Amino acid sequence: MQTIYTLFLLASLLSLLLYKKPLFAQKVGFGLATLFSLYAAIFFFSNLGETLVWALPGNFISAPVFRLDSLGMFFSFLVSLVAFAVSLFSFDYAKFYEKKANLAVFAALFNAFILSMLLVIASDNVFSFMLLWEVMTLLSALLILINDGKDASKNVMVYLGIAQIGAFCLMVALLIMASVAGSFEFSAFATMDISFGMSLTLFILLLIGLGSKAGMFPFHVWLPLAYCRCPSNASALMSGVMIKVALFAFIKFSLLLPSLVEFGYILLFMGALSCVFGIIYALVSNDYKAAIAYSSCENVGIIFLGLGGAFYGLGTHSLTLALLGFIASFFHILNHAVFKSLLFMLSGNVYTATHTRNMDSLGGLHKQMPYTSIIFFVAVLSICALPPLNGFASEWVVYKTMVAGGMGEGAAPRFFFSLAIIALSITGAMAIMAFSKVYGSVFLGLPRDTKRVEEVKEVSFVRLLPLGLLASLCVGIGIFMNDVIGMLTTLVLTLIPQTQLATEDFISMPLIILVMLLCAIIPFVLFYLFKANNKEARVTDPWACGFLYNNTMQIGSNAFTGDIKKALSFILRYESEVKIDGYFSKAVYTHKTRDFFWDKLYEPVIHYIMVIADKIGVFQNGRTNLYAGYILIYLCLVLVFGHYFL
């Protein structure tokens, strides 16, 4: 595994050395990333059942050791698989940012970001983990700034602010665990003896610290700000695998705590909220990239539902339920990594062709970009959990977990699992509506802004190849779901030994496909039997109440979700404005949906911080003698604290 880490480091350094030849550096950097990611994916997949250890040579403060067990191998494989597809996509896509940033730096940051995620997964002590965790966060922030522009710095600061809140909670939790274990090595944490209250406190700290990075509600506000701003290949990595690194750490550290039923209840409740609120904001967004970003919060909620069932099973010693819950969560982690990275790369195709993210300005792109449209349709079917694709397969296992958990005795489990089932059902219906709007507004109908789409062309084969690969995985994983579940069962059994799961209880996806084909054939049979009208259909212009029809009369994304916005007006802050310069001038409509939780939770906090910062700004006056006095006062306070409290 050390060879893989070294290769990515060399690729990053080589890209920087080619700083004065950015186009050549782009080909070298992303080309090497493609080759190394493919090699890494093959290596990690072939060693899923192994445990590898590598001690970093040299004298360091903490003598860092990197260890990969079955869980780490699985998540390293996910990172490498998605990185391979995104790197190949970036080989051509990155040229779009030639005038915005040096492509050599772009390629170097890209390789370093992949390396940082792999090293975080393999880190085996507190010091190296937190150091690499912060490096990963910083590199992702720099990738956001590649697409510099209006409000870029503000968006990055929001992302970094939430990330640092999470990092603080994570650091506190790990230091407490290290203090109890008497060692900073994660391998020694298994011997911890922790009380109920401390265990619950540590679990909440881990949930905040790692859930904020994963985009869990109510820390979801950074998702559209960061993902919409950064290049689509970077957002594919961030949403596809960076949030999976946070989920890996959450699973790894939470399993080191004493198993409590309350862990399951907390995850079920937070997962249900993340599902519902994530898909609501995805549904009402007019920005197709923001809609994809908000759905990350929804899918993280689905993963938490599976984990909630797993931890509830551990707390009640129902090992079969725990095994089923972990399989459900790992299955959806795999599927989300595939279809979400695919959707963000597809959004990059649309943006580079049209230079807009506003769905109300698009339409009819299927004719100019047929291959992108077909692959986008596959990705939409997958994220909407429609059979026989992979999204349906994993959500079916999540449903099965919720039903099994809800059959337990007691009011509490029945309430929380019922809440989860209701939330998942609502989320499924809204997801279909949300992504029907996205696909229909972008690819179907007629162009609403003809000037913007008249010169649109299909992207190159180099870009379509990785997209086709991920789309085929969406189909293949769904069809062969039982084989994937068998592989995941072997993985989960390393976490929960001495239990079994009967895989024959799962549905047969080939049988579902056969039923769907029969349902598709039946209407044609009925038309033939009842002698349907086979005359050629008349094609005329749409009736527009006597007015000359134009493209802007077709339904837009705002009208598509107008009733939802009215029904949820107590949560959604919907603003619309009409500008008309004169009676005969064209009216300009602007629509914006504000995040309720940003307005009520984050904006007041930011306001008070700015006020406090202005007040304490008087201490920064440029006088050296006062600065020396500050240092003296600080040292005196440290001595007093050390004397009385240490």
Image: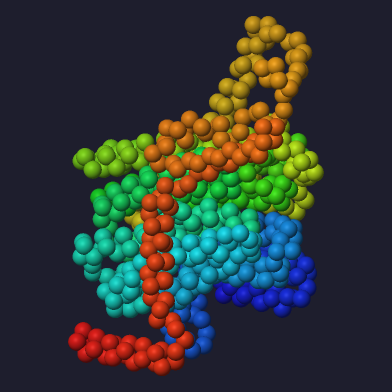
- Vertical placement of 136 versus 387: above or below? below
Residue 403: x percent and y percent?
34, 37
- Is residue 215 in sight in this rendering? yes
Residue 240: x percent and y percent?
55, 55
- Vertical placement of 366 versus 166: above or below? above
Q: In which quadrant of the rendered image does the N terminus lie?
A: bottom right
Is residue 54 left or right of 289 when viewed as pictured? left
Q: In which quadrant of the rendered image does the C terminus lie?
A: bottom left
Residue drawn at x 44%, y 38% is: 427
Residue drawn at x 49%, y 62% is: 159
**Most extreme residue toward the front, as rendered?**
582
Residue drawn at x 23%, y 43% is: 412
Q: In which quarter of the view is residue 63 placed?
A: bottom left
Residue 472: x percent and y percent?
64, 45
- Is residue 73 in sight in this rendering? no
Residue drawn at x 55%, y 40% is: 577
- Camera-nearest residue between 513 and 225: 225
- Camera-nearest residue between 623 and 462: 623
